[in-house]
Amino acid sequence: MNYLSTRGHPDRKRFCEILLEGLAPDGGLYLPDEYPQIDSATLAKWRSLPYAELAFEILSLYIDDIPPADLKAICAKTYTPEVFGTEEIVPLRELEDGVYLEALSNGPTLAFKDMAMQLLGNLFEYELARRGAELNILGATSGDTGSAAEYAMRGKKGVRVFMTSPDGRMSPFQQAQMFSLQDENIHNIAITGVFDDCQDIVKAVSNDLGFKRKYRIGTVNSINWARLLAQVVYYFAGYFQATASNDKPVSFTVPSGNFGNVCAGHVARMMGLPIQTLVVATNENDVLDEFFRTGIYRVRAAADTHETSSPSMDISKASNFERFVFDLVGRDAAKLRSLFVDELGGQGRFDLSGDPAFKQAAERFGFKSSRSTHADRLATIRDTDKRFATLVDPHTADGLKAAREHLAPGVPMVVLETALPIKFAATLVEALGHEPARPARFEGIEALPKRVVKLPADVEAVKAYIAQNCD
Ligand SMILES: *Cc1c(COP(=O)(O)O)cnc(C)c1O
C-alpha cells in the first residue's frame, strides 16, 4: 500500500514512513492511493472477530511494512479489556428505538481519542526501536488530545512528550488527569496565556527547522494517518453490533471538530461498509455544518471561534477536511490545490455551491449535518437522563440531537459517544444540578501530587526547557 499527498506531490510513501510525520512535504495530507474493497464474504468472516483481531485485519490492508506477527501483537497489546474496560472494547447499547450509543470513551482518559492514541503509542515505540531513534512529541492541548497523548506515551521507550496547555484554563479534572502523571518521559508545561498562545509556540518551534532536527521534534495531531486508520475499526465494530447480517445499512452520527473521527467513517464507507448516512454534528462553531448545507467552506478567525460547552469541537477550521474534499473532487490534486492553497489561502474560503461535486457530498458520499447550541446540549442531557437514566457528555449530546434530525425508518442510527460526562462535570451540573459519577480509578485525583512547570508564553523559554530535558 502506497500513500500519496492530497496536493499532488509525486512521491509515494509506505506506512512507516508517514507514521512519524505530519503533513506531506507540499503541505497536503496523506491518503492511501486507493481504498481496499471489502466484500460481503470478508465482512461475514470479520463479524465474529474480537476487536483486536478485527483491528489487525483492517490495519493489515493498509500496513505492509510491519511483519504481520508484529502487527498482530501490537493490536493484541493495545485493545485489551484491562485498558478499555470491556471485552467488546466499544460496546453498543440501544438508547431508544433505532438509536444507539457506541461507547468509545472507556479508555484511560475517558475520551474517544484513546482509541487511536493507544495504538499510536505502541506503533511509535515499535518503529522507533526498529530505527534506533528517539522522538520528542511537542503538542498544545486544551484537554482531550493532550491527556490521550500522555497516557498513550507514558513509559514508552524512545519517546518524550512536551505538552503545553493554557495555565488554569482546563477543567480541574482534566488538569489532574495530566498533571498527576509522574512518568519521567512526560512533561507538562502550563503556559501563562490562552490555547492560541500554546499553539503559536508549537508552530514557532516546529518552524525552526534547525531546532526541530536537532531535538527530533514530532507531533501527534489529528492529521496523523495512523490515528485516522485506528478509528476506522470501530465503525466496523459498531456496524456488526447494530446488525445481524451484512445486507443492512447503518448510519452514524459523529460529534465533529477537526473532522478526524467522521473522516474515518468516510474511509470505512469507501471500503464498502454498508453505511447509509454520516451525520456531522457541530456546535456553534459550525464551519462544517455550513459547508454541508451550502457548499461554502469558510474558516473562522480566532475572534469568531466560540468557547462552548463542547470545547473539543471548538475549531476555526477542520484540519482533516482536506482528505474528504480530495475524494469529493474526484482526487483531482490540481483542483484540490486551487481550493485549499489559492482560495482558502487567499480569501479564507472556497465555494463549491455551484460545482456539481458539491451535490455528491450528500448523494454519493452520504454526508449530512446539524448544528447545536448550549441550550440544545443542556436540553439533551436532561432529556437523556430523564427518559433513559443515562448521562451523556456535552459532545455526545450534540451528536444525539443531530442524530434525531436525520433518522430514517428501519436504519439503525449509531451515535458515537466521544467522552464520558465526568470530563465535563460543570456542564452536567448546570444541566442536572449534580455531578456525574466518576470511575473508581479517578477518585480523588485532584489531590494527587502534580508534575508541571509553569512557563511564560515565550518560544525561547519553551525551547530552553525542551533542550534541558532532552539528555
Ligand atoms: C476530539 C473530540 C471531538 C472531535 O473529534 P474530531 O476528530 O476532531 O472531529 C469530539 N468530542 C470529543 C470529546 C473530543 O475529544
Image (cartoon, rainbow, N blue to C red):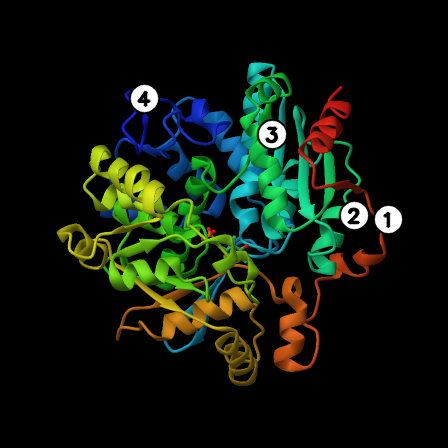
Q: Which residue is mark 1?
A: 449
Residue ID at (53%, 53%): 112
Q: Are marks 1 and 3 in contact (CB under 8 Å)?
A: no
The span from disc 2 to disc 3 (Cα, nearest Å) is: 26 Å
- Relative to 138, does residue 82 appear above or below in the rendering? below
Q: Position of residue 179 (x, y in %)?
A: 76, 47
The residue mark sitting in front, 1 or 3, is 3
| Residue of label 4 | 12
Q: Are marks 2 and 1 in contact (CB under 8 Å)?
A: yes
Q: Is residue 104 visible?
A: no
CB within 8 Å, label 2 to label 3: no
Task: Tell me the tag on residue 205.
Answer: 3
Q: Are marks 3 and 4 in contact (CB under 8 Å)?
A: no
Mark sitting earlier along the chain (4/1): 4
| Inter-mark Cα distance, 1 to 3 | 29 Å
Quick one: label 1 or label 3, which is nearer the N terminus? 3
Q: Amino acid at mark 3?
A: Val
* Residue 460 on image: x %, y %: 70, 30
Closer-to-camera residue (88/399): 399
Q: Amino acid type of disc 4?
A: Arg
Question: Does label 2 or label 3 sit earlier along the sequence?
Answer: 2
Residue where numbered disc 2 is placed: 180
- Nearest the viewer among 76 and 399 is 399
Q: CA distance from mark 4 to mark 1?
A: 47 Å
In the drawing, does residue 158 fall left or right of residue 298? right
